[in-house]
């Protein structure tokens, strides 16, 4: 039995082994990914991002617990800003294990954000495909929404949650503003803290700025939530980000959040956005592959020595980097 | 007079215009960058990064003020996690202007982290080259050290400062661990807060883990600071990250920090690391150019229609993304 076949048969050990192959981009992982790809396309990919300190990990845990109550199989992909310095993923596996340990319907994977630009996005896409093919219904992709590349990973999900908390500092507000635009659902976590009302007001006014026309007709998705536009005019269907409050530490607001995610899935199917988002995701993945393949071919065709000599010329200021590339391309 | 010549002649308006060209990667910007490149290689590039909320911007302001006292010309490049949603760079220009406004020896530029992977790194490298050629002695590159790509930008400087504060939360600690390894100097900012001592102890033990051998011989750079190894054995010269305390809001610790940065510059020259780091930076830049050029050529050679048909096949699960790329490359 091949590795892909074992994974399709539900063997957890093979699943774990394959994930490592995919993360390390080994030939074995590549073969298995090709074999598994026809079995993908069924899972609901949910991106969860937000500034540091918003309690994303707890929220993701709670989401997983809720989905387990519905007997859905849940995979968690935690993209962590860790490093060789600390020896691997810092957040993630261990902390989560308390609530979810021993449950065969849950699989947790931490991904370290080392490696080259684009490498992490590619590995995350591959890991999500493995979970999808292995029959997981929900794949939660958690990233720290502070870096552009990490945000890019979260936005490629079908549904993107941006997590906020009352009373963050200015620096963090700035980061938040940058990722709000990708939110399908904004979660105000730690909503039992002082300042939740004013945080919600601030978020609403930012959303009104972004969706000025719809401000008049809907109250942040309530019209859609009532189901009205879906029937009357499916082509004009538009999703206004919902704002939901949670306290992830005790599970408050989680059932309502799950309902909102479900509503978004319904919206995606009705509007055709499900297929459109999938296409965007697959297109991004295709482009990353093309880029990688082109660079590999170039490396194979240009001797290391020529590259080093070119670098010498750049360092001596004889050639600018751009002139150097033109020269290399001509040769 | 060309744009490059005006910049070399010290015209600030031309400088501002060229920076915009470089940020947008226009042909005019590319021509000017080629012309300016022979004039680069003199500035000291200082990367300043750290988790959100550590007061990086204030610290960068203070560093600029200190360098101005030494009559050095200072450029600040603030790489901000902003977005079209909020209409541009959130941090940066306006806040800084109070202290530095009207000073012709200072130039501040905010860069938004929109655009493709690698695009920001390329634009930042170009902007730094313009400042370098224009005769700025010190170029401070400030990034939010929470995303991999932003950290990658900071680490390409000659000297990298990682800013920390006492009493950050767990999420942020994890981020911090990921960027500590790139620090030449660790700055404990807001050092008047409770917990500065324990923060320094924690940082020291993390450093000891990373540099176990040197723990015995030096006390975090003190031996080097005394100048001993530099004379005795330049090839074995090794920099152990220094820890410095500051209160950026009132300037406490800033003169000592400037001295440490200067010490690092001396170390870089003595050890040969100055040229080595420059080579790494230029090599990264060269690779980004190669990648971009290869993708552009590929795009020009493959019709949009063929790419769309390939995407159709992927979405129908007839081809995996990797199989699709192989097929495209054969054609």
Image (cartoon, coloured by chain):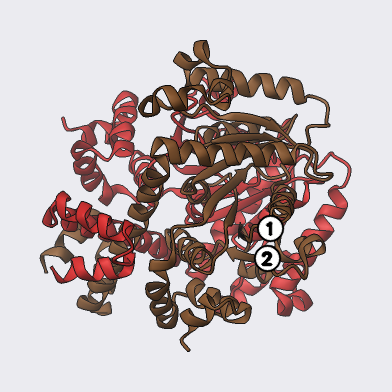
Chain colours: A brown, B red
Q: Earlier in the sequence, mark 1 or mark 2?
A: 1
Q: Picture coordinates of residue B1 (x, y %)?
A: 16, 30
Q: Give the image location of residue A55, x and y in percent.
A: 73, 45
Please give the chain letter of the residue carrying mark 2: A
Chain containing the residue with disc 1 = A
Instruction: Please state if A102 lies on the left or on the right of B84 as rendered.
Output: right
Which image quarter holds the C terminus of chain A?
Answer: bottom left
Q: Which mark is residue A105?
A: 2
Q: Residue A185 is drawn in which quadrant?
A: top right
Front residue of B134/A23: it is A23
Percent position (x, y) of residue B223? 72, 69
Identify the secondary structure beneath mark 2: loop
Q: Between residue B328 and residue A176, name the one nearer to us.
A: B328
Query: Residue pushed farthest front?
Result: A231
Would residue A52 appear left or right of A289 to someone viewing this image?
Answer: right
Q: Is residue B70 visible?
A: no
Q: Which residue is labeled 1 in the image?
A: A71
């Amino acid at each position: 039995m091949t590795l892909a076949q074992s994974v399709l048969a539900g063997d957890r050990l093979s699943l774990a082994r394959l994930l490592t192959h995919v993360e390390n981009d080994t030939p074995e992982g590549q073969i298995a990914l090709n074999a598994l790809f026809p079995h993908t396309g069924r899972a609901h990919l949910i991106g969860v991002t937000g500034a540091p300190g918003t309690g994303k990990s707890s929220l993701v845990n709670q989401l997983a617990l809720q989905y387990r109550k519905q007997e859905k199989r849940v995979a968690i992909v935690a993209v962590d800003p860790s490093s060789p310095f600390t020896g691997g993923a810092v957040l993630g596996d261990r902390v989560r294990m308390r609530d979810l340990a021993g449950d065969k319907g849950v699989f947790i994977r931490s991904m370290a954000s080392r490696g080259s630009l684009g490498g992490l996005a590619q590995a995350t896409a591959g890991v999500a495909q493995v979970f999808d093919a292995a029959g997981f219904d929900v794949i939660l992709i958690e990233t720290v929404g502070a870096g552009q590349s990490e945000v890019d990973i979260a936005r490629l999900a079908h549904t993107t949650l941006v997590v906020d908390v009352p009373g963050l500092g200015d620096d963090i507000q700035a980061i938040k503003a940058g990722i709000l635009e990708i939110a399908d659902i904004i979660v105000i976590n730690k909503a039992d803290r002082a300042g939740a009302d004013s945080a919600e007001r601030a978020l609403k006014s930012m959303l009104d700025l972004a969706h000025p026309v719809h401000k008049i007709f809907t109250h942040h998705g309530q019209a859609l939530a009532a189901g009205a536009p879906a029937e009357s005019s499916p082509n004009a269907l538009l999703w206004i980000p919902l704002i939901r409050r949670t306290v992830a530490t005790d599970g408050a607001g989680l059932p309502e959040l799950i309902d909102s995610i479900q509503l978004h899935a319904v919206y995606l199917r009705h509007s055709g956005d499900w297929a459109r988002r999938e296409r965007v995701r697959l297109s991004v993945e295709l482009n990353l592959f093309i880029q990688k393949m082109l660079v590999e071919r170039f490396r194979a065709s240009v001797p290391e020595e020529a590259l080093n000599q070119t670098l010498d010329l750049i360092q001596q200021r004889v050639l600018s980097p751009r002139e150097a590339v033109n020269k290399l391309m001509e040769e």
